[in-house]
Amino acid sequence: MTSTVSSDIPLDGFNPQSAKVIQWTREQLTEADRKWLRELPYVLVLHGFTIVHATLCEPRRWGYVFDKLAAAAHLEYQETPCFLWTHACADGFYS
């Protein structure tokens, strides 16, 4: 999985505070750390539990869940009874 911190993606599209945090994080990572991050799957299903950083409908696009519509799109692809996603920017429970 190529992420912003495990790659050299330009940071000019990020807000200044985010770019500063990403740059700091990049400086802390060893090449072995970056390799480990790049080898992670975009979606992991483990013991009936789904883990995804972005959304299940487009995990490689790093989409966010801001509202019920985005949550509904994500849930269309949900195949396990429980899941965790970390690009959810609107607190709440969706079912």
Image: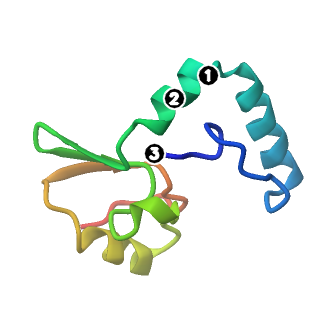
Give the position of the N terminus as an image quadrant. top left
Q: Quadrant of residue 78?
A: bottom left
- Spatial distance from mark 2 to mark 3, Cα to Cα? 9 Å
The type of residue carrying mark 1 is Glu
Tell me residue 14's x, y (percent): 79, 57
Task: Identify the secondary structure beneath mark 2.
Answer: helix
Report whether 80 appears left or right of 63: left
Single out the residue that lies furthest toward the bottom. Answer: 69
Residue carrying label 2: 35
- Spatial distance from mark 2 to mark 1, Cα to Cα? 6 Å
Q: Residue at x 23, y 74 (%)?
A: 76
Nearest the viewer among 3 and 14 is: 3
The type of residue carrying mark 2 is Lys
Nearest the viewer among 69 and 63 is: 63
The type of residue carrying mark 3 is Met
Q: Is residue 44 above or below residue 74?
A: above
Q: Residue at x 72, y 31 (%)?
A: 26
Task: Identify the secondary structure beneath mark 1.
Answer: helix
Residue carrying label 1: 31
Task: Identify the secondary structure beneath mark 3.
Answer: loop
Of pointers 3 and 1, the one earlier in the residue sequence: 3
Local packing at callout 2 (Cα closer than 10 Å; few below 14, some 14-19, many 20+) is some
Residue carrying label 3: 1
